Amino acid sequence: MTSRSYEQFCGVARALDLVGERWALLIVRDLILGPKRFTDLRRGLPGIGTNVLAARLQELERNGVIERRALPPPAASTVYELTDYGRELEGPLLAVGRWGALSMGARQPGQTLRSEWFGVALKAFFRPEAASDLKAKIELRFDDGTFVARVDQGSLVLEPGSPNGADLVLETEVETLVAFLAGADVPLAALAPEGDTALLERLPRIFAFGLAA
C-alpha cells in the first residue's frame, strides 16, 4: 500500500490507495503506449520533480502496477513498464479520459500538449465497430514525434516510429488532427495527407472525437 490509505474495505478506495497519489495515474497513462526510461518519463511529465517521480515509481512498483526491466546491450538501460495487473487499468483510465474530455474546452495558454497523450486519446475514442472491416497502417508525424496506428479488423495498436508501407501518412499538429477527427472543417492541406484518401475520410468515424465536442 502507499504511505496513506483510506482504510476502507471498498474496491474504489483500494484503487485510490494504489494509484490515487498525485502523478500516479499520469505515469500509468504515459506507459500505456509502451515502456519508458526514467528520463523519458521525467521529460514527458512537465512539472514533476525528480524526487516525486522516483517516489511514485517506487510506490507503483511496490504495489504491482509497474515493473522494471533491464534492456540488453547496447542499450543497457532500465525501463519501466506496466505489469499485467497494471495493464488492467487501461480500460478504466481511457474511460476517465473520455469523461474528462467532455469538459476540457479549448486549450488554454500554458497548457502542455504532447503527441503521446494524443495517442492515448486515439485509443480512448477508437470505435472497433467502425473499423471491423479495415486493415491499415496510419503514420502520424508531429513535431515532437512520429508513431503508427495499426488498425486490424476492429483492433488498434499504437507504436512509435515510422513503418514501411503505411497506407496513409499525415503530417500535422495535434490540435489540427483533433479538430478534423471531431468533425471540424479542416483544410486537407493542413493534414498534408499522403496515400489513401478514402481511409482519411473514414477516420472521424473510426476515432469519434466528435463525441467529446
Image (tube, rainbow, N blue to C red):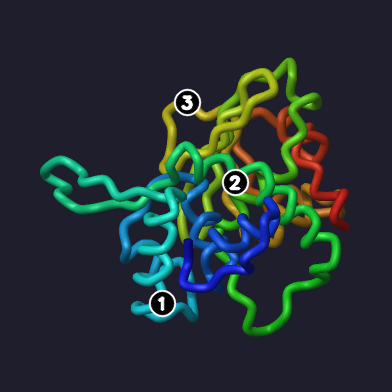
Q: Which of labels 3 and 1 is toward the front?
A: 1
Quadrant of residue 21 in the image? bottom right
Residue 169 is situated, as x and y percent measured from the top left of the image, at: 57, 39
User: What amino acid is found at the position of numbered circle 1 in the picture?
Assistant: Val
Chain-order first, disc 3 or disc 1? 1
| Residue placed most toward the observer, 14 or 53 | 14
83 above or below 164?
Answer: below
Residue at which label 3 appears: 165
How crowded pointer 2 is (Cα within 10 Å; few <14, some 14-19, many 20+) is rated as some
Residue at which label 2 appears: 89
Question: Rounded to the nearest whole Å, what is the CA distance between mark 1 and mark 2?
Answer: 21 Å
Chain-order first, disc 3 or disc 2? 2
User: What amino acid is found at the position of numbered circle 2 in the picture?
Assistant: Leu
Compared across the picture, whether 5 is left or right of 209 comes to left
Residue drawn at x 88%, y 58% is 213
Question: Rounded to the nearest whole Å, what is the CA distance between mark 3 and mark 2?
Answer: 33 Å
Residue at which label 1 appears: 52
Residue drawn at x 48%, y 70% is 45
Residue 188 is situated, as x and y percent measured from the top left of the image, at: 74, 48
Residue drawn at x 67%, y 55% is 9
Secondary structure found at label 1: helix
